[in-house]
């Protein structure tokens, strides 16, 4: 089972290397460090997610909350580097991301209904704040 995790991490590193090669050959700045710093958040989160789902019988599902939070936060900032959002929606997005990470944990281990209530409340509250920031100006 450990080989699956190593395979996916090798695939991710190969894609990063391909991006660096593209940057060198075509002299574009898409794959510069100033644009790709969110990978330092995204890759550890993806590692936690892939490691859990490839070995879920031996792993604690509690790793899904920080893994989901790091993955979604890194993805948000990576997308934000290439298609900038308003700065005013950044903190509500963190609330939404935390709700999604807790919901992911609840889906895998549905024993505590309190987690479901908290995750849905965070998702709704974050969505409302994003909507208010976009409509409010």
Image (spheres, rainbow, N blue to C red):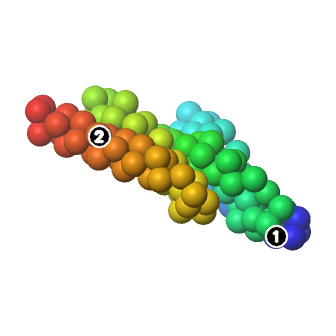
Q: Are marks 2 and 1 in contact (CB under 8 Å)?
A: no
In percent of width and height, residue 45 lies at 65, 47
Q: Which residue is mark 1?
A: 4
The quarter of the picture where the C terminus appears is: top left
Can residue 3 be seen in this snapshot? Answer: yes
Q: Is residue 133 left or right of residue 112?
A: left
Q: Which residue is mark 2?
A: 125
Looking at the image, tell me whether mark 2 or mark 1 is earlier in sequence order: 1
Please identify the residue farthest to the left as the structure is shown: 136
- Real-space Cα separation, disc 2 to disc 1, in angstroms: 37 Å
Q: Nearer the viewer, residue 28 or 69?
A: 69
In percent of width and height, residue 84 lies at 35, 40
Q: Residue at x 54, y 52 (%)?
A: 112
Quarter of the view holding residue 61: bottom right
The quarter of the picture where the N terminus appears is: bottom right
Q: Secondary structure at mark 1?
A: helix
Q: Residue at x 57, y 49 (%)?
A: 68
Q: Is residue 72 left or right of residue 135?
A: right
The local crowd at label 2, few if under 14, some if 14 to 19, many if 20 or more residues have their Cα within 10 Å, is: some
Q: Nearer the viewer, residue 14 or 25?
A: 14
Q: Secondary structure at mark 2?
A: helix
Q: Nearer the viewer, residue 31 or 45?
A: 45
Q: Nearer the viewer, residue 74 or 57?
A: 57
In percent of width and height, residue 5 lies at 80, 63
In percent of width and height, residue 17 lies at 73, 55
Q: Can you say whether 125 is above or below 51 in the image? A: above
């Amino acid at each position: 089972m450990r080989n699956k995790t190593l395979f996916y991490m090798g695939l991710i590193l190969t894609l990063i290397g391909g991006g660096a090669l593209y940057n060198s050959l075509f002299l574009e700045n898409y794959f510069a460090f100033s644009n790709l710093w969110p990978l330092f958040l995204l890759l550890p989160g993806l590692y936690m997610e892939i490691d859990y789902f490839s070995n879920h019988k031996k792993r604690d599902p509690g790793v899904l909350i920080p893994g989901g939070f790091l993955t979604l936060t890194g993805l948000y900032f990576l997308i934000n580097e290439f298609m900038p959002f308003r700065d005013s929606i950044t903190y509500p997005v963190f609330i939404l991301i935390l709700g999604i990470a807790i919901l992911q944990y609840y889906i895998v281990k549905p024993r505590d209904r309190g987690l479901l209530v908290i995750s849905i409340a965070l998702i709704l509250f974050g969505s409302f704040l994003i909507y208010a920031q976009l409509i409010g100006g």
